[in-house]
Amino acid sequence: MPPSRAASDTIFLHRNDLPDGLDLGNMVAIDTETMGLNPHRDRLCLVQLSSGDGTAHLVQIIPGSPGGKPADCPNLKRLLISPDVCKLMHFARFDVAILQHSLGLTLNSVICTKIAARLVRTFTDRHGLAALCRDLLGVELSKQQQTSDWGAPELSPEQLAYAASDVLYLHALWEKLEALLVRENRRDLAQACYDFLPTRAKLDLLGYEDPDIFSHRSN
């Protein structure tokens, strides 16, 4: 595995896997960047992780050949399947699906801040990460690099900063949202949703996103 490099004092870029011995604690914020939104067509390009300490570790996933499968990523896979590490995500349904499909594993111990927001912030339809960070944390996130080319061999400093921002605030955001879930007596309901996420992702990958098997629609 090529050596890691520090993109800044708080952002570290790794190629194809996390470095040996890196301990990110028992709750890790995780996000992904891909070539598009179809897991069967669009490859996984980047996995962002943060322990909540203000630093982000970005794993650039480089296929072994054009259009080929990604590298084995044993350290990253070990973290993703560990029942002792809580994976904190925003819109986990997509991230879980792309990780399960691309890396050939099943995640567990997942928390989704978007589900939490939709359960307790029923007075608004603004549940995106940028809106939540602005409303709950007073943090403005730039989405300027959202649609850039994440499959490029060399990612720009602007891309790396954008990717890191998607995980750097999730711990603080979850703290706010969990308190609201407890206040509204919906923490157990949220947990039931989280426990179902790996299965929901498998259904999406099998093509049951539309039509949704939970829908009343019969045609």
Image (tube, grey):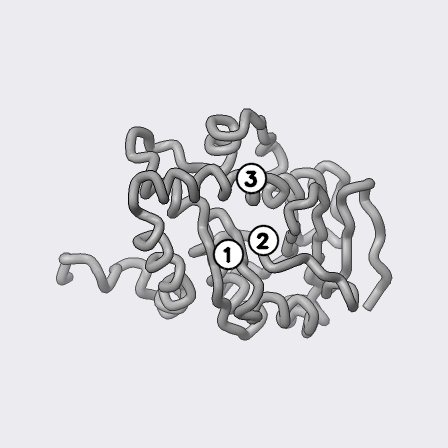
Quarter of the image where one finds residue 2: bottom right
Marks 2 and 1, the one that precedes in the sequence = 2
Left or right: 39 as drawn, with respect to 65? left
Q: Which residue is mark 2?
A: 30
Labels 2 & 1 near each other (Cβ < 8 A) = yes
The x and y percentages for residue 60 are 71, 57
Disc 2, SS: strand
Cα separation, mark 2 vs mark 1, equals 8 Å
Judged from the image, the secondary structure of the residue bearing numbered disc 3 is helix
Foreground mark, 2 or 1, reads: 2
Q: Which residue is mark 1?
A: 95
- From the image, tell me which residue sits under label 3: 172
Q: Amino acid under label 2?
A: Ile
Q: Nearer the viewer, residue 151 or 71?
A: 71
Q: CA distance from mark 2 to mark 3?
A: 14 Å
Q: Residue at x 75, y 62 (%)?
A: 22
Image coordinates for residue 151, horizontal then vertical, percent: 67, 53
Is residue 14 rendered to the left or right of residue 27? right
